[in-house]
Amino acid sequence: DAKTTQPNSMESNEEEPVHLPCNHSTISGTDYIHWYRQLPSQGPEYVIHGLTSNVNNRMASLAIAEDRKSSTLILHRATLRDAAVYYCILNRGSARQLTFGSGTQLTVLP
Amino acid sequence: DTAVSQTPKYLVTQMGNDKSIKCEQNLGHDTMYWYKQDSKKFLKIMFSYNNKELIINETVPNRFSPKSPDKAHLNLHINSLELGDSAVYFCASSQGQVTGELFFGEGSRLTVL
């Protein structure tokens, strides 16, 4: 199965944009790129997903490299409530693949 | 209304005991899952049910037995608990095959002494 690599931690200032990177150099053509986040003491929460084109929703934007070997989750204005662990996962349409790695711990500074 | 609810939220028990965790979803989804999150925060799928039928059973010991009485419920029963079973167990649900969104419960923290 294709794997993803994310930085262990990142910091951002409140109300500034945050770019969370994810490398997935062994991605296959049918792998969707999913992002989830986990707030302290809560279950993971879906953020966004995409296949090839950039995607926007009310929570975030997903920028996917042209070769699809990397992607970036963009939070346009970080708030203190965005402090969480962010997971980048590849999914070929099977829940069996939805194993979450260690993710990126995002700290938002006031 | 909570979309995916699990009970209990905390469970402390002795080695060798048998315990159950219950999960209910009110989203009308047809697929439910159990995930285990270990101390290193890795979250790994254990089981998946679609319309009450088991479709994913990862390499989980036989001591773990899921039961789905109906589409809205997926319970997890664990026999002969071991220290290594200590973890947070998350229930989740989705509609159909997973190319979209999984909805997770808040988790059940199991501590085996």
Image: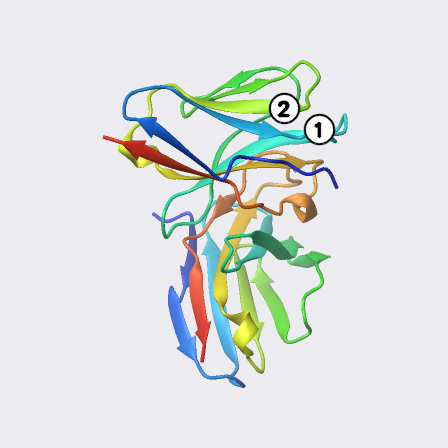
Residue B18 picture location, percent across and down: 52, 81
What residue is at 63 percent from the left and 24 percent from the top? A70
Image position of A88 with respect to B13: above or below: above
Chain letter of the residue beneath label 2 in the structure image = A
Q: Left or right: where does residue A90 sit relative to residue B3?
A: right
Point out the tag, 1 or 2, that comes first from the N-terminus. Answer: 1
> Residue pushed farthest left?
A110
How many residues crowd mark 1 within 10 Å: few (<14), some (14–19), many (20+)?
A: some
Chain letter of the residue beneath label 1 in the structure image = A
Residue B13 picture location, percent across and down: 43, 80
How many tags in the picture? 2
Q: Nearer the viewer, residue B83 or B80?
A: B83
Dividing the picture into quadrants, the one containing residue B96 is: top right
Residue B35 picture location, percent across and down: 56, 56
| 3D distance between C-alphas at marks 1 and 2 | 7 Å
Please give the residue where the numbered disc 2 appears in the rendered image. Answer: A70
Tell me the element at label 1. Answer: loop
Image quadrant for the N terminus of chain A? top right
Tell me the element at label 2. Answer: strand
What residue is at 39 percent from the left and 50 percent from the top? A42
Q: Nearer the viewer, residue B95 or B33?
A: B33
Image position of B5 with respect to B94: above or below: below
Image quadrant for the C terminus of chain A? top left
Question: What amino acid does circle 1 point to?
Answer: Ser
Specify the label residue B63 is tagged with: none
What residue is at 48 percent from the left and 48 percent from the top? B104
CB-based contact (under 8 Å), mark 1 and mark 2: yes
Q: Are marks 1 and 2 on the same chain?
A: yes
Please give the residue where the numbered disc 1 appears in the rendered image. Answer: A25
Residue A40 picture location, percent across and down: 36, 48
